[in-house]
Image (cartoon, rainbow, N blue to C red):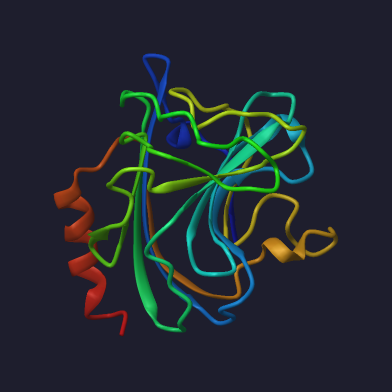
Amino acid sequence: VVIIPDSPLFDHLSDGKSYFSVSLWYKRQNSTDAGVLISKYSYTNPSSREWDIEIEGAGNVEFQFGVNSGGEYNRVQTKSGSIDDNDWHHLGLIYNGNSTNPSTPTSWTDDADGYFTMNGRIRVWLDGNEISNGSNEWAWKAGNSGHQAVPPAALVESTSEVSIGTITGGRKGYDSSAYWFEGQIDDVLYYSRVLSEAEIIKNYKAGKRSHK
């Protein structure tokens, strides 16, 4: 686990909208438990829930985001590209607040997935291949308090630290060890802008030889 204090370098708002990108390599040791790859999200402080990127139990990519400073949050999950092996894989993710707003999920209920189209707000690449481009390619997952929201143009901003391998409050001494990523994470890059597909693929190719 790596903890990085909050810094203006992690600001993602520009002109009232959120823009950022993440590039990293990961290798799961336990292919059944969910785990956080990188986050700017507090488990213990509801007003500091910005975003986190997880690999859920079946291997799909999950993005959790705060809806407001009151602590409400929601989760969205890719429907394809799940990886449940113990090999190295490259993940590239961009958040583009200037995109067309995501569509309304087919269901908002807590016990059923609602499928929708992200419209470029979040795009995800695994091993150089985009897995988020298509119709109804995302599943909406219930957050808390029954709050209903898809990823907004502007995410909540806070003073939460950046954590690699967990979320704030997910370390020893708290009861949220389920958020720990079991495995290895390497070559983590954060950008306060939206990378192009060519840049994502370039990062993948640059690290492929050393992650076999």
Side of 58 relative to 174 (left or right): left
Which residue is found at the position 60% from the left and 64% from the top?
A: 35
Examine the rendered structure and indicate whether residue 113 appears above or below residue 20. below
> How many numbered marks are there?
0
Q: Position of residue 93 (x, y in %)?
A: 36, 49
Side of 48 relative to 124 (left or right): right
Q: Position of residue 168 (x, y in %)?
A: 69, 49
**Along the line of sight, which residue is nearer the eye, 143 or 164?**
143
Which residue is found at the position 28% from the left and 46% from the top?
A: 134
Examine the rendered structure and indicate whether residue 91 appears above or below residue 199. below
Which residue is found at the position 56% from the left and 49% from the top?
A: 39
Q: Position of residue 167 (x, y in %)?
A: 65, 52
Image quarter hosting the N terminus: bottom right
For residue 90, what is the image quadrant? Answer: bottom left
Q: Position of residue 143 (x, y in %)?
A: 68, 40
Judge whether residue 191 can be spotted in this image.
no
